[in-house]
Image (cartoon, helix red, strand yellow):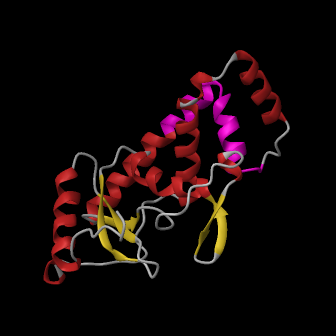
Amino acid sequence: LGERVKALSMEARPAFSTKEAMDVYVTLLRAATSRRQTEEEFAANAAKVSGFAADDDSYHARMLRAFVIPHRSWLMVNERRHQMRLLWDQFFDDWDVMLCPAAASAAFPHDHVGERHERTIDVNGKRVATTDQLFWAGYSGGFYLPSTVAPMGLTAQGLPAGVQIITRQYDDMTSIRFAQLLEKEFGAFVPPPGY
């Protein structure tokens, strides 16, 4: 694999911020999941949204705003998604793949207490919202990009860790082939003891 890598960058990114990527993804994701609200829940969520500060970009605020988003606003966010897809395409004019985490942490004990947006997990010794894990799925999936997750060994705790390989839209075979090359270099997935 080393002989085949022609260029490597730790700074290369598509021409938009990761914050904007998360905002667009969560808005479209949560708008798509809002159909199950009753009329009463919709009204209650609209009332809650009116009480949020304009600069509140917490997951909870983003989720509830998306639950009650007017169609015109949804169209604008969806249009921005398509503009960002073009920026991804420009990124892939220069790069074959983007390597990034599949998630912010390895597997973690599931916590079903309280609301999902209130739960936290440990990431590198710091408590972070479990909903932050959505970012890495949305970084590719929110823009219709194929990605493959390849095993990269075990954490210090013996849990499997992987890398997400993102490629240009409709270029699934490149991410799959890159995963195969990584497997030759780093080995295949090994289940943790007891699984």
Frontmost residue, 159 versus 141: 159
How many numbered marks are there?
0
Q: Residue at x 51, y 66 (%)?
A: 104
Give the quarter of the figure containing the N terminus. Answer: bottom left
Q: Is residue 159 left or right of residue 16?
A: left
The answer, for residue 14, to whether it is visible in the render is: yes
Report x, y in % for residue 108.
Answer: 53, 63
| Magenta-colored span | 55-79
Report x, y in % for residue 36.
Answer: 59, 23
Q: Residue at x 35, y 67 (%)?
A: 163
Q: Is residue 5 left or right of residue 22?
A: left
Report x, y in % for residue 102.
Answer: 41, 61
The answer, for residue 6, to whether it is visible in the render is: no
Report x, y in % for residue 64.
Answer: 70, 36
Q: Residue at x 37, y 70 (%)?
A: 160
Residue 92 lies in quadrant = bottom left
Q: Residue at x 65, y 64 (%)?
A: 128
Frontmost residue, 26 versus 113: 113
